[in-house]
Image: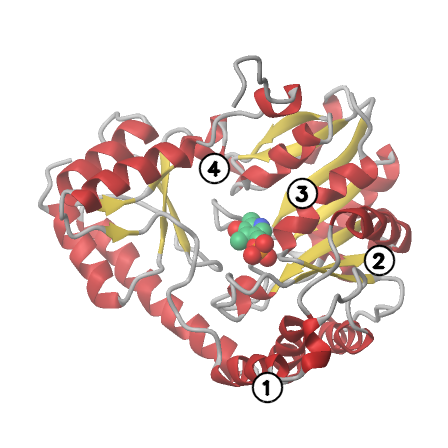
Amino acid sequence: MTKNFQCARRLQVLPEYLFDIIAMKKAEAVAKGKDVIDLGVGDPDLPSPLHVVEALKKAVDDPSHHRYSSFKGMQELRETFAAWFFLRYGVDLDPDGEILPLIGSKEGIGHIHLALVDPGDKVLVPDPGYPTFQGGTILAGGIPVYYPLLPGRGFMPDLQSIEKMDLRGVKIMHINFPSNPTTAVADLDFFRQMVKFGRRHGIIVCHDAAYAELFFDEPCPSFLQARGAMEVGVEFHSLSKTYNMTGWRLGFAAGNRDIVKALGKVKANYDTGVFSAVQRAGIAALSGDQGCVQRSREIFRKRRDIFIEGLASMGLEAVEPRATFYVWSPVPGGYTSMEFAEKILEKTAVVVTPGSGFGEYGEGYFRTALTVPESRLQEAIDRMSHSNI
Ligand SMILES: *Cc1c(COP(=O)(O)O)cnc(C)c1O
């Protein structure tokens, strides 16, 4: 690297990824030979469904899948997603203009800013929230404007307060339900309010529905079920959490035709679409037996119950999640989130994520991902209760 080398300003102003610090501490603990239990990263430990793996294997053997695919994705995949969406949500999507396959939903969530945000435009970002909302905004030269998700409101956005802010120059509002990290679930009425909000202020609504299928009681609604949603926004879906396919990289943007088209234009310039064998596997996942999704839900529900009970036995309160594979809990004993995460890791070799990594309003919380088997989860609870933290 030359002495005069300097990263672009957009990278310099990107905040430090707080999770890197925890990842470093974890690596240190592992190097010391400690038996680390990682409840940090939101990456399911369960294998991808067998019939999906088989579909990929078969596709890989076919040389026609070894060539470039289109950024638009296969017609058959878009049609399969449309059929799945209609079955699940009762919403009719046009596979030719209202659906765009993505290399994981994160790819689309990041790139959408390049399609919609001019330098200096503002983007409403949930705090605490998924870091890509902020990162994508900054990389496009936009300005993130954080709106708080507070426990007093069940971690739902306070639209009345947001409307009192100066909304001039705001282009997008990001929402994410079920929420990572808070696990809050939105109802259809909230999505209807979001449509009104978007219309009233000319703000595009981007809903991240990555966890929409990981619910424990009522199925979660889609933003696109709200009347008028197709005029004001898009929804991001992902096979990652639904089918335990995080490594495969397959997601979708669905909704407003013009927004979908604009995102496609960015993609056409950045990538050449999803590996078509993976698209075949996606078709198998979306059109196949959905029993595998129900089995995942049951596994995560049991883990949730074990963990919530474990926290309660330590005198720690946490809201019982109605969806996602996370638990969002207040930090005990006057520690900051980061101090708590570091202490727990040091004393028990259990990795949790400090809430402050998700934004200012995540301070005072920690997130645990229920991505280890029940016995390991119980072990983590036992270690934590004996740690005197
Ligand atoms: C995991 C996750 C995603 C993205 O997943 P992909 O693997 O890129 O589809 C998006 N949003 C949230 C909130 C997530 O936790």
Identify the residue shown where x is 21% and y is 46%: 30
Give whichever of discs 1 and 4 has the lower sequence position: 1
Q: Which is nearer the N-term, disc 1 or disc 3? A: 1
Q: Tell me the amino acid under the disc marked 2.
A: Arg
> Is the Cβ of the residue at disc 2 closer than 8 Å to that at disc 4?
no
Q: Looking at the image, is 197 positioned above or below residue 287? A: above
- Position of the C terminus by quadrant: top left
Which of disc 4 and disc 3 is earlier in sequence?
3
User: Pointer 3: residues within 10 angstroms few (<14), some, or many (20+)?
Assistant: many
**Residue 88 visible somewhere in the drawing:** no
Q: Which residue is mark 4?
A: 151
- Looking at this view, is 271 or 361 the one in front? 271
Q: CA distance from mark 2 to mark 4?
A: 28 Å
Q: Say which label, 2 or 1, has the lower sequence index.
A: 1
- Nearer mark to the viewer, of 1 and 3: 1
* Distance between mark 3 and mark 4 Cα atoms: 27 Å
Mark-to-mark CA distance, 2 and 3: 26 Å
Which residue corresponds to mark 3? 110
**Distance of mark 1 from mark 3, alpha carbons?**
31 Å
Q: Which mark is residue 351?
A: none
Q: Mark 2 vs mark 1: give the one in front.
A: 1
Q: Are marks 2 and 3 in contact (CB under 8 Å)?
A: no
Is residue 261 shown left or right of residue 60? right
Residue at 29% over, 51% down: 38
351 relative position to 359: left or right: left
Query: Looking at the image, is mark 1 or mark 4 nearer the viewer?
Result: 1
Residue marked by disc 1? 58
| Label 1 to label 4: alpha-carbon separation | 48 Å
